Image (cartoon, rainbow, N blue to C red):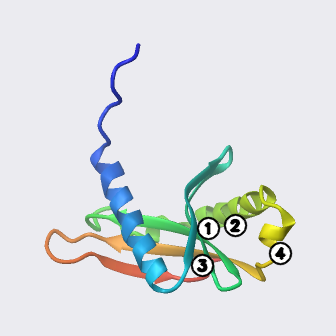
Amino acid sequence: MGGSPSPPSRRNVVGRYGEDLACRHLSGLGYAIVARNWRCPAGEVDIIAVDGNCLVVCEVKTRTSAAFGTPQEAVTWRKARRLRQLSSLWLAERTSSETERFDEVRVDVVAVSLPKRGAAVLDHLRGVC
């Protein structure tokens, strides 16, 4: 039953690369990255960050082509609503001293397009819900 784990899929590698780029982008804007790939039974948040007094729950979508739509289009209103719910669950796991500094909670999307040639293109959508 043991054995070594299977190698990550191309999709996982592309997604992880997009998340790395998004973290660098957010850090460059002065955000403090608090958690990556936070999971609970209700779902997962790619990046949790702090922007001043704002808790930012960030979804990262990375695409290598637009064959199935843009990365932005992959974040539906249902997904945005789920992220808002997950932010409440993340906050509920923290002590009041950890959470009292947040005046607001915002859901952002970082859309990453990876063209066949050239640099990645990032589109940071703030406050999608």
Residue at which label 4 appears? 100
Is label 1 in a helix, a strand or a loop? helix
How many numbered markers are drawn?
A: 4
Is label 2 in a helix, a strand or a loop? helix
Q: Which mark is residue 3?
A: none
Q: Are marks 1 and 2 in contact (CB under 8 Å)?
A: yes
Of the numbered discs 4 and 2, the one sitting upstream in the chain is: 2
Residue at which label 2 appears? 84
Q: Is residue 119 left or right of residue 92?
A: left
Up the image or down, 65 lies above or below 9; here it is: below
Q: CA distance from mark 3 to mark 1?
A: 7 Å
Is label 4 in a helix, a strand or a loop? loop
Residue at which label 1 appears? 80
Q: Nearer the viewer, residue 65 or 41?
A: 41
Q: CA distance from mark 4 to mark 1?
A: 23 Å
**Callout 1 amino acid:** Ala
Of the numbered discs 4 and 1, the one sitting upstream in the chain is: 1
Q: CA distance from mark 3 to mark 4?
A: 23 Å
Up the image or down, 109 lies above or below 4; here it is: below
Quarter in which the C terminus is drawn = bottom right
Q: Are marks 3 and 1 in contact (CB under 8 Å)?
A: yes
Q: Nearer the viewer, residue 70 or 115?
A: 115
Residue at which label 3 appears? 128
